[in-house]
């Protein structure tokens, strides 16, 4: 590869170009000051300018995070980690002055792990070279995670000019989008044509930002893949509802400080990231949940100080209420899910646990729940509970996102369902029968099928290559126009709750009825009741 140079507001950058000189990559660009020392748990600040030419040929460190087993489909790779993690990466085949659509990618990881450069093998899962060749300017980024990114605490709220705390990771996303507005033209991107694209936690983030006043005007289309925050903001934050209200978040922060023995914010800020992440919090919940990624405590009432908070500033209310009132950012939307979301979510260990959890969680809806998610053995209980969690965390959320937006916005929403099973090597991954697993569509979207040194160097077929061409073309067309439809692609109708249609990505792409209507009806009723309780 040869060198490439760009000039942005903060200074000059030296990246690298591909061997044919078509695509230039700039990696490890700071988009904010390092959030360390006194800047821990503060909103990100613009980066300092530099003299000379800064090297931009390697990724910045990932945020501190817990390990994920290397044999998991969700292992992000062995990347350097540091609290100094606010860096982004750009791929472009455009010249300064061009106005190409911009794709800004938000990575997966449950707000606890992952990065914008996750590299479990070969090039990054999110390497943007092929999309840049196809006409986009691609941006990926790292942000603060877990307790470093989402800790709420009464003293943090008191020192904030907005009387808010807990959403530093979301503020990092906003700061990166502000950087894009200031600088993307230097890479040939159009700051007036920015599409945010996210997977899992990244998709949840997009639903938050569509409801966030500070993010208004920073993006113009949105694609949310497997994730959306449309449950009620409650007093606790369990595995299924990744948002809590500010009083609950502050109580969580106080408990964490007590567990750490920290009496002041200065003492909290002086702790190492490793110490901050390692301390468990007391819980009365039984540890009956297990994760495909490894054992974990995931009681429904359990809390973690690592998820977004309805803080009154970044999030004035939970996204459901914002969207229901038609107050979300009115941008075109694509959203959807994969057929086996259960591959990466928790299940219970025993049949007894499955029945007990159903009674505790669903009350007089238990019989109906068990008809939809039946089990007669421990193994069936694991699968049934994981399937129900996958449907609750992802399927119900993404369908609700499309339904709300189609009702209250002028801009259209488009829904999809992914069922194509990638050629996953047998016997390697710890996930049980992953099938069309959570994040299965990523190599297709990024056009990595058959690409040399790709992270998923699997035995791809011509069918996979054709599907990648179709889905990535939908995403690129949508980024350009706000509508995925164009000549040569299957017709994709906008979502209509009266006649719900989704684009199905299986062995081919074709529009058809939204699946799982019986289960979606159950989750509709469950969340209607949960919201009524939250308002009471």
Image (cartoon, rainbow, N blue to C red):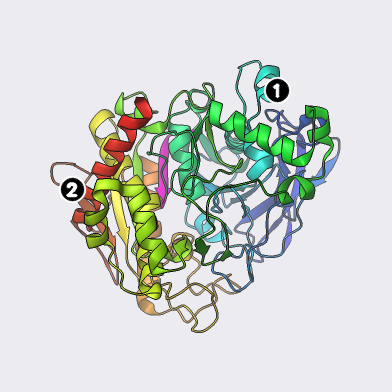
Of marks 2 and 1, the one in the foreground? 1
Q: Which mark is residue 155?
A: 1
Label 2 neighbourhood size at 10 Å, few (<14), some (14-19), many (20+)? some
Q: Secondary structure at mark 2?
A: loop
| Horizontal arrangement in the rendering, residue 311 relative to residue 37 (left or right) | left
Q: Secondary structure at mark 1?
A: helix
Q: Where residue 68 appears, x then y in whole percent?
A: 63, 63
- The answer for how far apart the CA atoms under marks 2 and 1 are is 47 Å
| Horizontal arrangement in the rendering, residue 201 relative to residue 476 (left or right) | right
Q: Choose the circle earlier in sequence order: 2 or 1.
A: 1
Q: Where residue 400 appears, x then y in whole percent?
A: 30, 42
* Residue at x-position 33% and y-position 33%: 531
Q: Nearer the viewer, residue 148 or 463?
A: 148
Q: Which residues are magenta?
A: 219-226
What residue is pinned by disc 2?
500
Q: Where residue 492 appears, x then y in whole percent?
A: 23, 52
Q: Nearer the viewer, residue 513 or 296?
A: 296
């Amino acid at each position: 590869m040869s060198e490439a140079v760009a000039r942005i507001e903060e200074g000059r950058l030296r990246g690298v170009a591909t061997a044919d000189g078509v695509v230039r990559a700039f990696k490890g660009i700071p988009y904010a000051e390092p959030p360390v020392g006194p800047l821990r748990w503060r909103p990100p600040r613009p980066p300092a300018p530099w003299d000379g030419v800064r090297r931009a040929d390697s990724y910045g460190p990932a945020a501190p995070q817990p390990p994920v087993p290397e044999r998991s489909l969700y292992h992000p790779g062995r990347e350097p980690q540091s609290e100094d993690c606010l860096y982004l990466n750009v791929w472009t085949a455009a010249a300064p002055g061009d106005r190409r659509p911009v794709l800004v990618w938000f990575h997966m990881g449950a707000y606890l792990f992952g990065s914008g450069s996750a590299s479990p093998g070969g090039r990054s899962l999110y390497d943007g070279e092929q999309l840049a060749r196809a006409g986009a300017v691609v941006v990926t980024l790292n942000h603060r995670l877990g307790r470093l990114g989402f800790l709420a605490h009464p003293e943090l709220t008191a020192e904030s000019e907005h009387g808010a705390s807990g959403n530093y990771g979301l503020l990092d996303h906003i700061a990166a989008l502000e950087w894009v507005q200031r600088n993307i033209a230097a890479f040939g991107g159009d700051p007036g044509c920015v599409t945010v694209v996210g997977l899992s936690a990244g998709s949840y983030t997009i639903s938050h930002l569509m409801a966030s006043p500070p993010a208004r005007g920073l993006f113009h289309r949105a694609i949310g893949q497997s994730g959306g925050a449309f449950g009620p903001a409650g007093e606790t934050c369990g595995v299924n509802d990744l948002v809590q209200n500010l009083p609950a978040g502050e109580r969580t922060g106080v408990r964490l400080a007590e567990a750490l023995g920290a009496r002041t914010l200065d003492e909290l800020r002086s702790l190492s990231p490793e110490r901050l992440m390692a301390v468990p919090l007391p819980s009365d919940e039984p540890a009956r949940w297990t994760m495909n990624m490894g054992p974990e405590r995931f009681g429904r009432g359990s809390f973690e100080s690592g998820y977004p908070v309805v803080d009154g500033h970044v999030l004035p209310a939970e996204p459901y209420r914002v969207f229901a009132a038609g107050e979300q950012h009115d941008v075109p939307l694509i959203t959807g899910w994969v057929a086996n979301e259960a591959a990466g979510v928790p299940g219970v260990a025993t049949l007894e646990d499955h029945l007990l959890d159903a009674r505790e969680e669903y009350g007089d809806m238990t019989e109906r729940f068990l008809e939809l998610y039946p089990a007669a053995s421990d193994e069936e209980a694991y699968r049934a509970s994981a399937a129900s969690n996958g449907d609750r965390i992802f399927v119900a959320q993404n369908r609700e996102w499309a339904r709300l937006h189609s009702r209250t916005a002028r801009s259209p929403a488009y829904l999809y369902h992914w069922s194509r099973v990638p050629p996953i090597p047998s016997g390697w991954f710890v996930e049980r029968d992953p099938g069309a697993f959570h994040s299965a569509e990523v190599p297709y979207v990024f056009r990595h099928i058959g690409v040399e040194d790709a992270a998923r160097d699997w035995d791809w077929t011509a069918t996979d290559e054709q599907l990648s061409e179709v889905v990535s073309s939908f995403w690129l067309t949508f980024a350009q126009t706000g509508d995925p439809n164009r000549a040569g692609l299957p017709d994709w109708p906008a979502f209509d709750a009266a006649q719900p249609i989704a684009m199905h990505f299986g062995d081919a792409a074709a529009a058809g009825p939204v699946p799982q209507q019986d289960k979606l009806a159950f989750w509709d009723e469950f969340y209607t009741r949960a919201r009524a309780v939250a308002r009471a």
